[in-house]
Image (spheres, coloured by chain):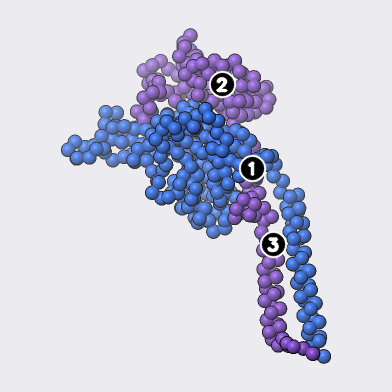
Chain colours: A purple, B blue
Amino acid sequence: MRLFKLPPQILRLVLLTLAIVGSYLAARAMLTPPSFGQYGWYRGAALGEIAARTPVLAGKKACDECHSDILHKLAGDAHKTLSCEACHGVSRDHANNPDILPVKATGSYCIRCHEANPSRPAWLKQIEVKKHYSEKCVECHLPHQPTQTQ
Amino acid sequence: MKTSSSRRSALVKLGGLLAGVLALPVARQVKAAVQQVLVTTPAPNGYDPTQHKWLMCVDANKCIGCGLCAESCKRENGVPEGPYFRTWIERYVIPKPAPGSGQTRGEVQVDSPDGGIHGFPELSLPKDQIEFSFFVPKLCNLCANPPCVQVCPVGATFRAPDGAVLIDPKYCIGCAFCVQACPYGSRFLNPVTKTAEKCTLCYHRITRGLKPACVEICPAEARLFGDMNHLPADDPLQKFYEKNRVEVLKPHLGTEPRVLYAGLDKEVR
């Protein structure tokens, strides 16, 4: 004996609702990336993918492994804040394989920072290249010990 | 008779649905495993973004406008040639006011030719007419309330727990809403990939214990960078914000940047 009989139209409606909700849940489960919500409302795996890029600049620490004598000279003078790659160019290849030589730094690298410019801060030593000598800075100045001349 | 047959079919349907729901986690795991095989991410091991809090400080007094930061950023991140920059240098020139104008200064001129990579051309203004002039390095301001993240319609850009505002290039649809929303102009559409791009704080470097390329290369130590959760007591960053009166760009917008500046002027925005 039945206490309660569900009318067929209601039953159909309930089943349809369940089917819609079920297919929505199934679609969401399949479409949401597995790492979504790991850190927040975004794909957590994206962080690892962005970080997967290989660094290009080798960094001063890599230079220090072989050229600590030059870095020591540098640290004792006005160019102590300079990164090696600021003048010698990107040197990751050289750091990985010492046979590949980095770019030879020339006087134009000095001009990049030391050419007189009214926008440059007054503490920076500046020259007007044409009036000073020429772009042959290293004929007199030692780039690793810029306060000394030869 | 009719009711019993409809009940049976209803029970079968219900059972099927239940089985489907129960199978969902399994299906999800299978999908994750398949993705793991198809997408290899040789990401640095042991980096936990919840354990770091990055901070960038810029001392505009020290910037000499050499453009090495902008240049190395392009090299480091493979930014396309042309007017696309993740970091760049702006030159501010504040002329003397016209005599009798009652102003403290003339109209400010700002330029950033090629992001400052190839230096700055000589000023048309004679030197004696300049009140003062200076350089300001610019980059993503690492907002705590990033407007770019709010407007993204697909949730492709987000603020990581370590403070870096990043873009998921696989989900970016290239609508450029974020390019318009950024009040600091630090986003652009990459002409090659057609997706939005911005400073990632050199995420591939900082997760390996290296400094961002612009900080690494800056010859004047105008840029300082560090992890506020693991900062040594003698770190230059510590000294920077202890010694300087720091400010942020456009504080009235409430974006709460994590790039602190020293030595700005009211004209810098």
Disc 2: host chain: A
* Numbered disc 1: secondary structure: loop
At label 2, which amino acid type do we have? Lys
At label 1, which amino acid type do we have? Asp
Disc 3: host chain: A
Q: Are marks 1 and 3 on the same chain?
A: no
| Mark 3 vs mark 2, CA separation in Å | 57 Å
B209 relative to B14, above or below: above
Numbered disc in front, either 2 or 1 = 1
Residue B218 % position (x, y): 50, 29
Q: Residue at x 56, y 38 (%)?
A: B229
Disc 1: host chain: B
Rendered image: mark on residue B60: none
B24 relative to B104, above or below: below
What is the tally of numbered marks visible in this picture?
Answer: 3
Crowd around label 3: few <14 · some 14–19 · many ≥20 (10 Å):
some
Q: Residue at x 58, y 53 (%)?
A: B156
* Numbered disc 2: secondary structure: loop
Q: Are marks 2 and 1 in contact (CB under 8 Å)?
A: no
Instruction: For residue B6, say whether it is visible.
Output: yes
- Dividing the picture into quarters, in which one does residue B267 lie? top left
Residue A19 % position (x, y): 70, 74
Rendered image: mark on residue A104: 2
Q: Residue at x 61, y 18 (%)?
A: A68
At label 3, which amino acid type do we have? Ala
> Label 3, on which residue?
A29
Instruction: For residue B213, say whether it is visible.
Output: no
Quadrant in the picture for the N terminus of chain B: bottom right
